[in-house]
Image (tube, helix red, strand yellow):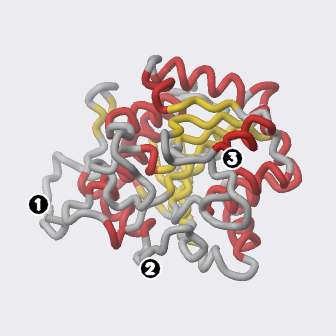
Amino acid sequence: MAGVTMTHDPHWPSAASLVHDHPVADRRNVGLLGVFTYTTSVTTRSWHNTPDAIREALERYSTWSYSDGLDLAETMALVDYGDVFDPDGAEGSERVATAVARFDVDLAMGLVLGGDNAATWHALHGLAGPALKDWGLITLDAHLDLRDGESNGSPVRQLLEAGLDGRHVVQIGLADFSNSPFYAARARDAGITVVSRDEMRAHAIEDVVARALAIAGASGRHVYVDVDMDAADRSVVPGCPGAAPGGLSADEMRRFVRTVTADARVRVMDITEIDVGRDSDDQRTVRLAALLILEALAGVRRRPS
């Protein structure tokens, strides 16, 4: 099914038409950057380029948001800044920092496409630099990502050690049997706010997001949002090595993204933990990631003018 050809219909423009190589006047521009990290992953990954696969999957969607009654093509644009070459290699962090520095100052938000979760460390550290203490972080993730070493299991710990204040970190969607008491204690000691998957489901997503933004964005902080696809149920994201049964539905994932990106404090969001080589024939993992891009645009569109 992945190779099914789309017919051309001039009355059904695809979401790929939102992508431009420069900011578009009179639109809210959202930057798009590929940071394809995979070589330091705890789980061996394939070499298939995930950001390119997500870009291609935009062809499967239109620009019309039925629930909001608006056409994203009238007000929004995705500005593609390309990919960072070998972000895992020597001086990879410097290459990512150089890439995010090219984001136009008038962008409404940036979108980073991983790669594994190491992309979160590279992107936020490169973006904030010495001002990391002035940022907050929200993760939607089954894991705490506080491991020792440098891998896709360590980005939150690395950011804390670089100056991120744990009191302004909120981790949502933590799964049972996917973490350890050692790292749970590390999160507690750092002052991190943890919202388990069950706790998240006990409340409206909108309320969970509002609480997270109040903590991460306190005192005027910029907020970085990490959407780790392993927060979703494995049936929804077979191309995510760390996903397990019992995770969030695709609808819960998209509602979270549209809600959190509607807040102007959110400056950058990433989508991580997809291995194209493991995805199903119908590309359901990649297609969900592409849908989340559009949900993010719809969220930004909801921001006050």
Looking at the image, residue 59 sits to the left or right of residue 9; the answer is right
> Picture quarter containing residue 166?
top right
Q: Nearer the viewer, residue 247 or 290?
A: 247
In the image, what residue occupies the spot 52% across and 65% down? 115
Q: Nearer the viewer, residue 141 or 147?
A: 147
N-terminal of the two: label 1 or label 2?
Answer: 1
**Residue 7: mark:** 1
Looking at the image, residue 283 sits to the left or right of residue 44; the answer is left
Question: Which image quadrant: the N terminus?
Answer: bottom left
Looking at the image, residue 163 sits to the left or right of residue 301; the answer is right
**Nearest-to-viewer mark from 2 and 3:** 3
**Nearest-to-viewer mark from 1 and 2:** 2
Task: Pick out the residue farthest to the front.
Answer: 181
Q: Which residue is mark 3?
A: 183
The location of residue 144, given as percent across then percent down, is 62, 46
The location of residue 256, given as percent across then percent down, is 46, 32
In the image, what residue occupies the spot 40% across and 31% down? 255
Q: Residues within 10 Å of mark 1 (few under 14, many from 20)?
A: few
> Picture quarter containing residue 68?
top left
The amino acid beneath tag 2 is Trp
Question: Which image quadrant: the C terminus?
Answer: top right
- Alpha-carbon distance for marks 1 and 2? 30 Å
The location of residue 97, given as percent across then percent down, is 74, 65
Q: Which residue is mark 2?
A: 47
The amino acid beneath tag 1 is Thr
Q: Nearer the viewer, residue 241 or 209?
A: 241
